[in-house]
Image: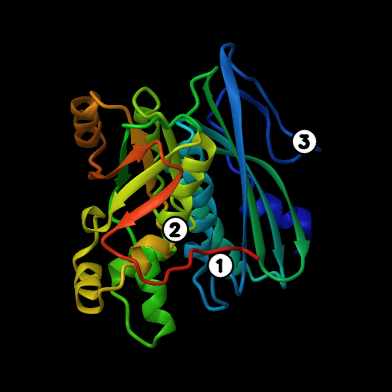
Amino acid sequence: MNEFDLIRKYFTWPIKDPSVALGVGDDAALFSLEQGYQLVTTTDTLTEGIHFGENAPAKDIAHKSLAVNLSDIAAMGAKAKYFTLAISLPKIDQSWLKEFSDSLRQLSERYEVSLIGGDTTRGPLNITITMIGIVESSKALTRSGAQPGDGVYVSGSIGDAGFCFWKLSNDFVPSNQELERLNCPIPRIELGLELKSLASACIDISDGLEQDLSHILEASSVGAVVEVNKIPLSEALHVHVKDTDDWSIPLCGGDDYELCFTIPEGKEEALKIVSESCNVNITRIGIVSESLGLQIEGFDGPRKSYRHF
């Protein structure tokens, strides 16, 4: 099987989106942009040995590769539309490719995003996805709009993926739910779309709550106070934190792909309606302040967020 056979068999899918005039199979894709909208684009690379182990199931690798890009689009309050896939493979393993392709297609259909192009080559296993979304002009959520007095909120529970990684690194057996949170995160696309009219700033939690919230504060030239005992935890992680008095996992664990955002005072009732309509728990964990920097109340132990270098 050569490169073109591989693309035709595993990555040439029917495109239902009428805005796509030309997808996989030509030198480049063609699509139309509706008047009054801006393009939103993001790219993430996942590499074997860094983002997933050599024995990781192909379906999980595919899911996470797409989900982390969808999460970036969600944080911008945008609608995901198209993506490209660049993949390097050490060899052509058709059973692996089928599992990868089926999982990627399943998630793309769930969120109605179209694969419109990409590239394949031989090399160490590496997946790069570029996601393209749309948002009404000047309506995108960014990191730079937080104001003193805004509440600081997070979706879902925090630290589950980091707790799973900690267990795997220390020869403990994680639960199926923890493995699911690490390997198959759920992007908060619907929530991001709803927050567009409510939030003053937003980011997805990929490198850890402390570090990612700090990006909002830096971009907005503000500070914040966060109370650790208000951070929503799973039952198992709550027990671990209680036993060890160590909040470093929920603060710095990363890979949650929940949303962290700020909401101006007076919009709490509207946010409650959004929480119910999206079926996502939303928790207030702190407040934006005028004093620069992030103040963590309730834990002063060592912590270190994820950095690529």
Element under disc 3: loop
The residue sitting at 54% across, 55% down in the picture is: 65
User: Three-letter amino acid code at disc 2?
Assistant: Gly
- Pointers 3 and 2 in contact (CB under 8 A)? no
Earlier in the chain: of badge 3 and badge 1, it is 3
- The residue wearing badge 1 is 51
- The residue wearing badge 2 is 208
Asked whether, in this view, residue 269 is left or right of residue 32, the answer is: left
Name the quarter where the C terminus is drawn.
bottom right
The residue sitting at 41% across, 46% down in the picture is: 187
Callout 3 environment at 10 Å: few (<14), some (14 to 19), or many (20+)?
few
Label 2 to label 1: alpha-carbon separation: 15 Å
Callout 2 environment at 10 Å: few (<14), some (14 to 19), or many (20+)?
many
The nearer-to-camera label among 2 and 1 is: 2
Report the residue that reaches farthest toward the front: 291
Rendered location of residue 82, percent (x, y): 58, 36
Element under disc 1: loop
Asked whether, in this view, residue 105 is left or right of residue 129, the answer is: left
The residue sitting at 56% across, 12% down in the picture is: 36
User: Three-letter amino acid code at disc 1?
Assistant: His
The nearer-to-camera label among 3 and 1 is: 1
Name the quarter where the N terminus is drawn.
bottom right
Asked whether, in this view, residue 96 is left or right of residue 67, the answer is: right
Rendered location of residue 127, percent (x, y): 64, 59
Q: Which mark, by number, is residue 28?
A: 3
Earlier in the chain: of badge 2 and badge 1, it is 1
Report the residue that reaches farthest toward the bottom: 171
Picture quadrant of residue 286: top left
Rendered location of residue 60, percent (x, y): 47, 64
User: Three-letter amino acid code at disc 3?
Assistant: Ala
Q: Is residue 18 above or below residue 91?
A: above
